Image (cartoon, rainbow, N blue to C red):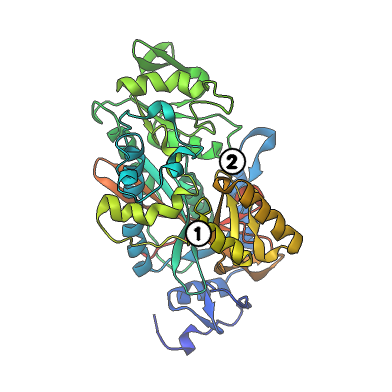
Amino acid sequence: MSGTLAARSLPPGLDYTPAAGAWDELADAGTVREPYASVAEALARVDLVEAAHQIAAQLAADGVAFGGGQAARAFVVDPVPRLVAAAEWSLLERGVAQRARALAAFVADVYDERAIVAAGVLPARVIDSAAGFEPALAGRPVGVAGFVAGLDLVRGADGVLAVLEDNVRTPSGIAYAHAARLARERFLDAGVEALPTGPAFAMLGDALHAAAAAGPEDAHVVLLSDGPSNGAWHEHGVIATRLGLPLVGPRDLEPRAGGLWHRSEGRARRIDVVYRRTDEDRLRDQRGRPTWLEAALLGPVLRGTLAVVNPLGSGVADDKLAHAYVEEMVRFYLDAEPLLASVATYDLGDEAQRATVLGSLGDFVVKPRHGLGGDDVSICSELDAAGRRAVADAVEAEPDRWVAQERIAISTHPTLCDGRLEPRHVDLRPFAIRGDAGARTAPVALTRVALERNSMVVNSSAGGGAKDTLVPA
């Protein structure tokens, strides 16, 4: 690949103008960024509109969607792939795995000695006020042998990727990223030989079996799903099929004789590991009553006869306020400097940090600690005076309900919109999987893209799409 400016100019036939004020993944000042040179040339040779139609038809034929039945929503894959340079991926591999190790250590510590609180690194209220904290597990060893983390990273105007959110309850996307790869490469040659996405399934399977208390040999692992009502229902089926796991629902579980059993083809078999992919992740509901999850899983977990991936109670590390302390978790638990930075996150329960945010609210994004899918997120620079006052009033009334993050100009990527290439904001979700060999980053990542102009909300529930994500082999 030539490094000359001429060789990296936008090729004839590729009509694209990056947006002002944000880092563009493909181009800078009219020239193609060097890792994208082959991709840009390949894109200039194809009919992207036709490729988009073919990709959409293939995904529909394969049943790739969010949810199931009449409520299913299309999984939209833009034909223009995203590329992560090999050197940057090498850093991500190490940084994502490091962060997952620290998050797993935090979950274990929360329900044991709370050493991080005793050391003054993290306030106890961050744990005790977290929606995902499970008091029933306090003082009980929480097994974290099996642990899957999906980190949402964004690139700011400085070109550096930083972690926007940590997802450790039920992170989804591996099967969707694989589906994006299969559909895109069938109809569009990106001009790059990329790492295959398929090995991520084997890595996940190894980690699930390794979580069994008695060891991986002959461990009976099931994937527990809500069924078609779950947004990631398609992924559940793909993973179960690829790994040869029974796909079970809450009604298929029977706690007895100190263990958890399920009945299949006329015989009952004791379960060693549950890969929980249900929307329900709490042991108690908002009124303090036991959920079906507690009734089925808690007893066997406490007796040590059942492992759950991700472990019960891991939602405490999924909390957006806990995110403000993850870099300190890396230093505390791993005695190392973080390889990946977090997007600066402010603890509004801390008086000094709250005053900083409220003093320049237009510089921040304010989020509910426990929200999903971009709900109730306020980009304060886009609000009028009354809107900002309402946000400030909500923060002052219940500071522990909210967090603030510095607003960053999230990077853009060329995306096919109404038949032409336009810049759209993107994030990146790589995955770390923790098994008996420690946490490793899977060779797969999902790029999510905001399909609406100027929108920074990439979530599929808000109309976002996805891109195949390439890492040069």
Count residues near mark 1 (Cα–Cα under 10 Å), then give few for <14, some for 14-19, many for 20+: few
The numbered disc on residue 352 is 1
- Residue 236, image x and y in percent? 49, 36
Q: Gap in Å between the C-alphas at discs 2 and 1?
A: 51 Å
207 and 301: which is toward the camera: 301
- Residue 87, image x and y in percent? 34, 69
Count residues near mark 2 (Cα–Cα under 10 Å), then give few for <14, some for 14-19, many for 20+: some
Residue highlighted by disc 2: 63
54, above or below 147, in the image: below
The residue under the point 47% across, 61% down is 343
The residue under the point 40% across, 84% down is 2
8 and 98: which is toward the camera: 98
Circle 2: element type: loop
Task: Please state, as top left, top right, bottom left or bottom right, where the N terminus lies in the image.
Answer: bottom left
Count of numbered labels shown in the rendering: 2
- Residue 131, image x and y in percent? 51, 37
Circle 1: element type: helix
Q: Nearer the viewer, mark 2 or mark 1?
A: 1
Closer to the chain start, of discs 2 and 1, is 2
Tell me if residue 155 can be seen: yes
192 and 68: which is toward the camera: 68
Residue type at tag 2: Gly
Query: Which residue is at the far front?
Result: 351
- Along the horizontal axis of the image, is 202 left or right of 388? left
- Residue 150, image x and y in percent? 44, 49
Residue type at tag 1: Ala
Task: Please state, as top left, top right, bottom left or bottom right, where the C terminus lies in the image.
Answer: bottom left
Tell me if residue 458 can be seen: no
19 and 326: which is toward the camera: 326
The residue under the point 38% across, 28% down is 137
- Along the horizontal axis of the image, is 334 left or right of 350? left
